[in-house]
Amino acid sequence: MRVGYGGNRVRCGPTAGQNAGMLSDHWPLLGLRLRTDRLELRLPSDEELAELGDVAAAGLHEPDRMPFLSAWTDVPPAQRARAVVQQHWLRRGTWSPDHWALTLVVFAQGRPIGVQAVSAKDFAVTREVRTGSWLGLAHQGRGFGREMRSAVLHLAFAGLGAEEATSAAFTDNPASLAVSARLGYRPDGVQRDNVQGRPRVTRRLRLSRADWERTDRPAVELTGLGPCLPEFGLGPQE
């Protein structure tokens, strides 16, 4: 039994490992692993997804800030946790090789601390991905942001053969912009967005394969990709 933000949870039914073992034949992405020196990125079990909801419920940013285009964190903790769970289910349920979003949970010392996503549309043709992420407030300021984005960039460029990766952050989000700068992204224009009824300026960023290859970055170990290639719209030989 584990006590969360909203009461007690009791594990029921098969263990997480048993579920993953049975489902991986039909959903090979469950076997995909990205590892850095301190982190592991992978899809979560149901119990781990519940823990991730607790991380979101505990807070993602200070109350006077809003780093996201959608103000999904401006709701009570229980609703915030539920939104995280539903988003993971939605992205799995709507996955297609032509339009996919891989929402990897970031684990440090075996516990979920945040999310690192990578997505694409018509990737087999465009060879372009987009990244996005969040970290629990208690885990920020420790260099995890650079390490986890490095992991999905390795998946994109070294694993999937991407040519470019894009990202974006508000101009008043220096931590995200600093991560992008250290990883070799270049400016790609700006846009103005309506966030909570106020104009916010977003800085778009772009990373080419050439810039990624010559930028110093954390080492990444990638396993389990082979069976997943068709899910990304790629043939087994790519």
Image: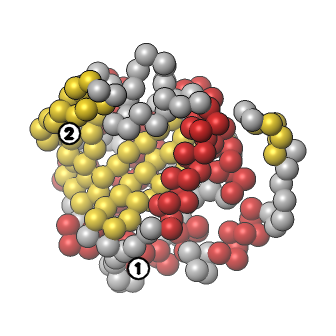
The percent position of residue 137, horizontal first and vertical second, equals 55, 26
Image side of residue 46 versus residue 194, left or right: right
- Residue at the spot 23% in from the left edge and 65% down from the top edge: 127
Q: Is residue 40 in sight in this rendering? A: no
In the rendered image, the quadrant that contains the N terminus is top right
Residue at 43% x, 16% y: name it.
64
Is disc 1 surrounded by few (<14), some (14 to 19) or many (20+) residues within 10 Å? some
Q: Earlier in the sequence, mark 2 or mark 1?
A: 2
**Residue drawn at point x = 47 percent, y = 70 percent:** 225
- How many C-alpha atoms fall within 10 Å of the one at disc 2: few (<14), some, or many (≥20)? some
- Left or right, residue 180 beside residue 111: left
- 125 displayed left or right of 107: left
Q: Nearer the viewer, residue 4 or 134?
A: 4
When asked about the image quadrant of residue 57, the answer is top right
Give the structural element (helix, strand or loop) at label 1: helix
Alpha-carbon distance for marks 2 and 1? Answer: 29 Å
Q: Name the residue type under label 1.
A: Pro
